[in-house]
Image (spheres, rainbow, N blue to C red):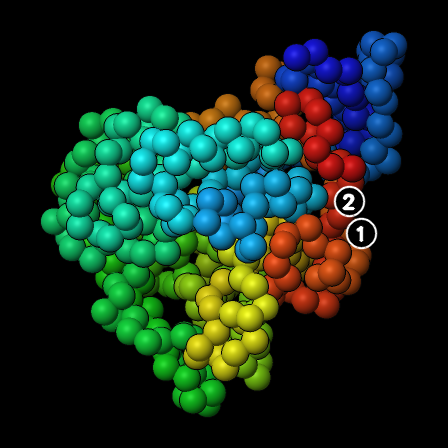
Amino acid sequence: MSTRPIAFLNARLIDPERETETRGGLLARDGVIVGVGPEVTRDQIPEEARLIDCAGDVVAPGLVDMRAFVGEPGAEHRETIASASAAAAAGGVTSLVIRPDTNPPVDDPAVVGFILRRARDDAKIRIFPSAALTKRLEGREIAEIGLLAEAGAIAFSDGLRSIAEAQTMRRAMTYARDFDALVAPVCEDRSLRGDGVVAEGLRASWLGLTGVPREAETIALERDLRLVALTGARYHAQMISNRLSIEAMSRARDAGLASTCGVSINNLTLNELDVGDYRTFLKLSPPLRGEDERIALVDALNRGVIDVIVSDHDPQDVETKRLPFAEAATGAIGVETMLSASLRLVTSGDISLPRLIRAMTLRPAEILRLPVGRLSVGAPADVIRFDPEEPYVLDPAELRSRCRNTPFDAARLEGRVKLTLVAGRVAHE
């Protein structure tokens, strides 16, 4: 459908493909980018176009978030497609991959169709359903991966659960490989995690809480990487959180395996000290670890060992969070604050802005084989404008999610998204 052209002038253009920053403009028409760079000036803009003088603000591709929970169907009190897309648009996210652990789970093509129809009717952004690897998320019988992919599922996992049986995981990878489908699980040995609620170590002992060893994640990851070598499947570890997992991914890359990985914005910007005195909004999975582990994650992102940053958006209602720490639900919202939180790394000098934007736009788009995440002529006009230096104090009451369980409650952040375009249409302003 035709849309009014829109032009951004006097902008800092972030190109994640070249990892460059230049001054110039961008012109979008009929849902695609038709001009970008220094040559886009006021003289080159058609008369009917809407002109936006960015006054030095950043213009970048819309963010692509590969992991978020949306409660529809079955848990609409936590989040709906409409509320999640509003929060995402406000945070600069234009493409959102949602988890399959709904009720009923996304293990049937009819559920995929339901989500896509609701997204078409209610969403302000692009919604992509992921589907279950096993039926009913039980880790036993392989789901109909071919039919689910044909219906529109973009990736496959069992949500919060990892598949315990190696033989089942091997069969799932082999089946997925035959359809060129992306296997994207969480990595966790549940028997080794046990009842752990925080990272294992001295801090856990001081708090009197059961710890989760790093090995619970890394053992599952190393098993999966061995199976990738055996089956040749496309594989993406949703979130890694420690140095042992980084080393495992480095070895897999050196061996030429078709494997990638992501990291949660929470593990990238927070550490175990932020849990403080049993702050349940920071009860997360994977748990927050020591500062040395967080620094290692930032270094791995800089080196390209970690490909993607995700919000791990997981709304929880107040009744499940206002409990003793060990009994509280795991998870935090994050799709609206992912960009602002990540800009802390730019302000501290730990990472360049182009490299950061690449990990939240181009790389996830490449892994998912989507045409978005680019700031180039012919690419979809999924574009955001933001001021990376505008300070604000986060007020959870202003967030658009149905829940308020943010780990950045009252935090001092920088980076307001001023405009979000999806296919050339304004989704947030």
Do the residues under discs 2 and 1 have CB atoms within 8 angstroms?
yes
Residue 59, horizontal then vertical, whole percent: 72, 33
Residue extending farthest left: 167
Q: Quadrant of the N terminus?
A: top right
Q: Which residue is mark 2?
A: 387
Give the camera-side residue of 371 and 375. 371
Q: In what element is the residue under mark 2?
A: strand
Based on the displayed image, in which of its 4 quarters is residue 165 positioned?
A: bottom left
Report the side of 187 relative to 412 (left or right).
Answer: left
Residue 285, horizontal then vertical, whole percent: 43, 64
Circle on res. 163: none
> Which residue is painted at 17% across and 50% down in the image?
140
Q: Name the amino acid, label 1.
A: Glu
Circle on res. 390: 1
> Which residue is painted at 63% across and 54% down in the image?
402
> Which residue is painted at 48% across and 30% down in the image?
116
Report the side of 107 relative to 385 (left or right).
Answer: left
Q: Residues within 10 Å of mark 2 (few under 14, many from 20)?
A: some
